[in-house]
Image (cartoon, grey):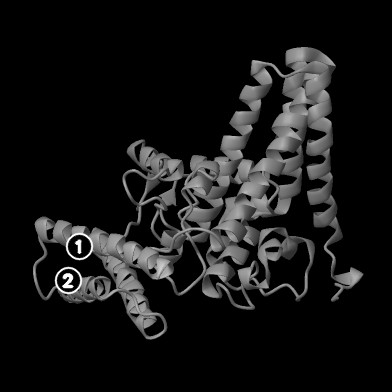
Amino acid sequence: MYRIPFDRVNWITSIFLIGTALTALIGVPIYIYKFDMDWFQYSMFFFYAISSTMSITLGYHRLFSHLSFKAKWPVKLYTLIFGACAFENSCLDWCADHRLHHKHVDHDDDPYDISKGFMWAHIGWLMFKLKPEPPMDNVNDLLKDKLVMWQHKYVHWIGLIIGLILPAVIGYFWNGGVGALGGFLFAGILRVVCVQHCTFFINSLCHTIGKRPYNTDNSARDSAIMAVFTCGEGYHNYHHAFQHDYRNGVKPWQFDPTKWMIWLLSKLGLTTGLRRVSDERILLAEMREAGRQAERMTAMEADAPICAKANELLNNFSQRLSESYTELEQAISGKVDVSRNALNKWQQETRQLVRHIASMKRTHKAA
């Protein structure tokens, strides 16, 4: 069995991750048993949880890593302060790692490469450093940002004072020593553990379980469940297909509070330049992947034949999809005009094909 040398262990990070998790698992139940929680403690926990989560998703991720919109200094300052409270490193370091992830996804230079295992992508890459730190030559734009560099210099102090000490102080003024301990445990420690592991699950779970409607060239997957716990970050397959879009949940029914907040801030004049992918390009990606699924199902015929009727349906829909796909490509390139009715027709055909592919899969498994 391979053993990682002790000199490869990131001791400070490991002790912090393990220590906070044990404190939350042991300390929180004991506190609830002895003192219970009141509405104020719940409110402070949710305020801090939402602020730090949104600062990672809206700030660290979509604003600073992908430049999917521009923000005025109050938005940047808020997300940098509460991003520090998440204890996920400075914005500069976080963005450097994340940009590497997108550039080398599923390969050795991906910091949280899922091919190294679920636990490596989830938390192992933080606890063990198997390689020298890569040069930070992919964040030159952020090196020029004074607010980002201020946070990078004082990130641990900001996180300690605003993220751990301040909740205890507020709790003290609410309910003395008991309130101070509760503020530290709930809005401080427990909130940090919850926010961190929800973020980590995007790197691990959303590269393991879920659907890939836009791109099967990498392991990123869409998870509606993780979107709930990460303010919309769970639609990870879409994000890897169109990383500069300020939206992750691109469909109207998809849960993406970060997208809604960015849009709301734009109406207040605090964000501008919201980048978004056209409906035609999104549908084109869906159709491309539906076509790939059809090709894979057709290829299965050689190994385990499916019923002739099912195979005929599959071939017919594959042909229709190919024609629509070509037409849509021409529309995007400007060679032909595209109407909303035509776009809706293509979308319906794509969804119909996907449903038939799912039916073909069930038929194939039952055969």
Q: Position of residue 27 (x, y in %)?
A: 83, 32
- Judge the density around disc 2: few (<14), some (14-19), many (≥20) Cα neighbours within 10 Å: many
Give residue 281's quadrant in the image: bottom left
Q: Regarding mark 2 in the picture, which secondary structure is present there?
A: helix
Q: Position of residue 315 (x, y in %)?
A: 23, 76
Which residue is drawn at the image coordinates 41% and 45% (left, top)?
259
Evaluate whether residue 282 shows in this view: no
Q: Regarding mark 1 in the picture, which secondary structure is present there?
A: helix
Residue topped by disc 2: 324
Q: Is residue 32 above or below residue 97?
A: above
As measured in the structure, the alpha-carbon distance from the residue carrying label 2 to the one carrying label 1 is 9 Å
Residue topped by disc 1: 349
Judge left or right: residue 256 versus residue 168: left
| Amino acid of disc 1 | Glu
Residues 131 and 5: in front is 5
Judge left or right: residue 112 versus residue 230: right
| Amino acid of disc 2 | Ser
Q: Are marks 2 and 1 in contact (CB under 8 Å)?
A: yes
